Image: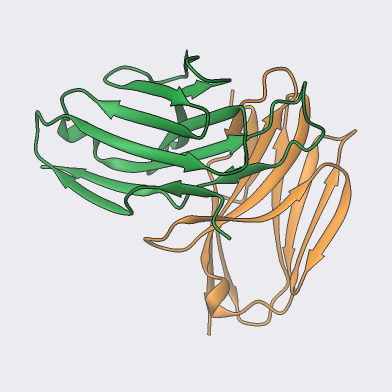
Chain colours: A orange, B green
Amino acid sequence: KNEVEQSPQNLTAQEGEFITINCSYSVGISALHWLQQHPGGGIVSLFMLSSGKKKHGRLIATINIQEKHSSLHITASHPRDSAVYICAVIMNRDDKIIFGKGTRLHILP
Amino acid sequence: DVKVTQSSRYLVKRTGEKVFLECVQDMDHENMFWYRQDPGLGLRLIYFSYDVKMKEKGDIPEGYSVSREKKERFSLILESASTNQTSMYLCASSLCQVTGSDTEAFFGQGTRLTVV
């Protein structure tokens, strides 16, 4: 069983739609990252969360520590948001970073 | 403002070559990690290190070794590269939770290695 599960695996939406990507984890964590990877590109950290909510431009990330769940939201989505979004958790028992398998997002113009 | 630097973005090596992938961080982090990313499998942990001279096997260490002679540098070594080691390799670093309150991780840009 994967310790970090993301859903959906793939998502196609029209430009302008509100996007939600979910991440659930089964281990104790000290922090969670949302990462973005464009096709053929490197990995960029969008957010680091240990509680609550963070907002950066059109991106919003939330985390519920009790429910072991985090969501990444994109408002007014744009084709340039097309990328793979990866959830990564830092385990509090040994500092290891564990990644979800990613959500491939495709925004159609 | 680059904090974790991987020496190459793209590499092409021949089967049987010894390959060094270098990762340097400038944040005095104790923890450093090497992962590989493959389609359908996501990012998997190869090796990690909690301090200088220390190394621990991750989930897929076969065919790899590492070196951490200085705190800021963590090298991944492919002793004899094979085609099944063609992948994207990612380095990450973080502070040890015992000594630091900030548990944020930082990620390199990745190295796309092709073994031919």
Q: Image quadrant of residue B35?
A: top left
Query: Which of these two is toward me, B13 or A98?
Result: B13
Residue at horizontal 57 percent and vertical 36 percent from the top: B93
x, y (%) of residue A40? Answer: 36, 60
Q: How many marks?
A: 0
x, y (%) of residue B22? Answer: 36, 38
Depicted A85 relative to depicted A74: above or below? above
Q: Tell me the quarter of the image containing the N terminus of chain B.
A: bottom right
**Looking at this rendering, what residue extends furthest in the bottom direction?**
A109
Depicted B50 relative to depicted B91: above or below? above
**Looking at this rendering, what residue extends furthest in the front direction?**
B70
Q: Is residue A47 left or right of residue A84?
A: right
Q: Is residue A101 left or right of residue B20?
A: right
Depicted B62 relative to depicted B21: above or below? above
x, y (%) of residue A43? Answer: 50, 54
Query: Which of these two is toward me, B46 or A106?
Result: B46
Residue at horizontal 61 percent and vertical 81 percent from the top: A15
Residue at horizontal 73 percent and vertical 72 percent from the top: A18
x, y (%) of residue A55? Answer: 81, 65
Query: Which of these two is toward me, B12 or A8?
Result: B12
Q: Tell me the quarter of the image containing the C terminus of chain B.
A: top left
Q: Image quadrant of residue A59?
A: bottom right
Residue at horizontal 20 percent and vertical 22 percent from the top: B79
